[in-house]
Image (cartoon, helix red, strand yellow):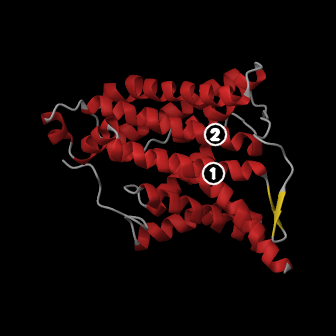
């Protein structure tokens, strides 16, 4: 019974982290499908979400209002990032654009360090800290919030992309930009929306994880890499593939950390990434690239 409780404890921890990786990975997937580039500034949007919601909360705003304003503020930053950094270089090669996102991430991190310093800041849990017990294992209420809201956001994203005019336009622009232009869709505007949506998902991940990990200016680097791993493992062209990749990655990390050594936690993510790239480069639920020439 103790072994079962221990295993459940690792799985609960892994699912919590995996849900965060999934949200971050979805941001990578959305931008990749719209532009065929990898936005390595995605982790910084997560960091901004955490620090901005903590700042709003410190100003005395209610937690729900602080959450909404933080996601909205980071979404605007994502839109501005595309307009100021990506669009002027839209005719550059994909490698050049990826380098621009790396530089943008470094700049955002530096500005965050100037604004918030190197201290770690805390955010109160959404609904208390009393752990819940299930089959001998414990789970924090914040973990339930993370998993439930991640599920809600994934379902909402799927519905947005398939049942709204804007979502269908974004999908059309990613499938075939030339045909999309011929039917009157402004592809450059769809690309900008994709950066805003990606930033919103990153901010949501930062808001959800802030009560557990605390907010610090350099928290986005490793989270961004783990989200990238989740996206590649699951398949950059599939929403549910990215979610699956994030959950598998989170559980694998937790099991390796608990059953082997915590020193292998980060290594596991990149080992799985390498194995997937070697044996199934399109991802576990891979599709052909959405963007065509």
Vertical order, 157 against 8 (above or below): above
Pick the residue in front: 118 or 16.
16
| Residue located farthest toward the front when viewing the structure as drawn | 163
Q: In which quarter of the image is residue 281?
A: bottom left
Would you place residue 52 above or below residue 171 in this image?
above
Near mark 1 (Cα within 10 A), the count class, few <14, some 14-19 or many ≥20, is few
Q: Residue 206 carries which label?
A: 2
Name the residue beneath numbered marker 1: 148
Q: Quadrant of residue 57?
A: top right
Estimate the x, y position of residue 74 in percent, counting from the top left: 55, 28
Q: Is residue 162 visible?
A: yes
Q: Tag 2 or tag 1, which sits nearer the N-term?
A: 1
- On the question of residue 100 being in view, the answer is no
Residue at position x 51%, y 57% from top?
A: 243
Asked if the residue at tag 2 contacts the one at tag 1, i.e. Cβ–Cβ closer than 8 Å, the answer is no
Quarter of the picture holding the N terminus: bottom right
Please state the total of marks drawn on the protein image: 2
- Which residue is depicted at the point 67% across and 26% down? 66
Q: How crowded is mark 2: few (under 14 residues within 10 Å), some or many (20 or more)?
A: many
Mark 1 secondary-structure assignment = helix
The residue mark sitting in front, 1 or 2, is: 1
Q: Position of residue 212 (x, y in %)?
A: 76, 45
Question: In the picture provided, is 248 more to the left or to the right than 190?
Answer: right
Residue at 33% from the left image edge and 35% from the top image edge: 166
Q: Is residue 198 above or below residue 285?
A: above
Q: What element carries label 2?
A: helix
Q: Where is residue 65 in the image (x, y as percent from the top left)?
A: 66, 26
Disc 1 versus disc 2: distance between alpha carbons? 15 Å
- Residue drawn where x is 70% and y is 67% of the image: 11
Residue in front for this viewpoint, 250 or 95: 250
Extreme residue in the left direction:
182
């Amino acid at each position: 019974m103790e072994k079962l409780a221990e295993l459940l404890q690792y799985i609960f921890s892994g699912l919590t982290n995996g849900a965060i990786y999934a949200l971050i990975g979805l941001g990578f997937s959305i931008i990749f499908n719209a532009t065929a580039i990898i936005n390595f500034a995605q982790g910084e949007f997560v960091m901004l979400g955490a620090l901005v919601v903590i700042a709003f909360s410190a100003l005395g705003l209610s937690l729900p209002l602080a959450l909404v304003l933080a996601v909205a503020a980071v979404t605007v930053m994502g839109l501005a990032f595309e307009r100021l950094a990506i669009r002027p270089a839209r005719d550059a090669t994909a490698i050049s654009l990826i380098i621009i996102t790396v530089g943008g991430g470094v700049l955002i991190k530096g500005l965050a360090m100037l604004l918030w310093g190197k201290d770690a800041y805390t955010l109160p849990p959404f609904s208390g800290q009393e752990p819940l017990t299930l089959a001998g294992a414990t789970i924090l209420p914040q973990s339930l919030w993370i998993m439930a809201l991640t599920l809600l956001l994934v379902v909402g994203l799927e519905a947005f992309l398939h049942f709204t005019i804007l979502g269908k336009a974004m999908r059309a622009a990613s499938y075939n930009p030339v045909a999309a232009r011929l039917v009157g869709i402004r592809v450059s505007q769809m690309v900008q929306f994709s950066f805003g949506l990606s930033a919103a998902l990153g901010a949501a991940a930062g808001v959800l994880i802030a009560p557990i990990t605390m907010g610090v200016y350099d928290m986005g680097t490793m989270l961004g890499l783990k989200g990238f791993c989740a996206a590649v493992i699951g398949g950059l062209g599939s929403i549910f593939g990215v979610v699956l990749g994030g959950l598998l990655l989170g559980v694998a990390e937790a099991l390796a950390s608990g059953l082997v050594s915590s020193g292998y936690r980060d290594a596991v993510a990149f080992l799985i990434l390498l194995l997937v790239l070697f044996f199934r480069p399109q991802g576990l639920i891979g599709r052909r690239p959405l963007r065509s020439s």
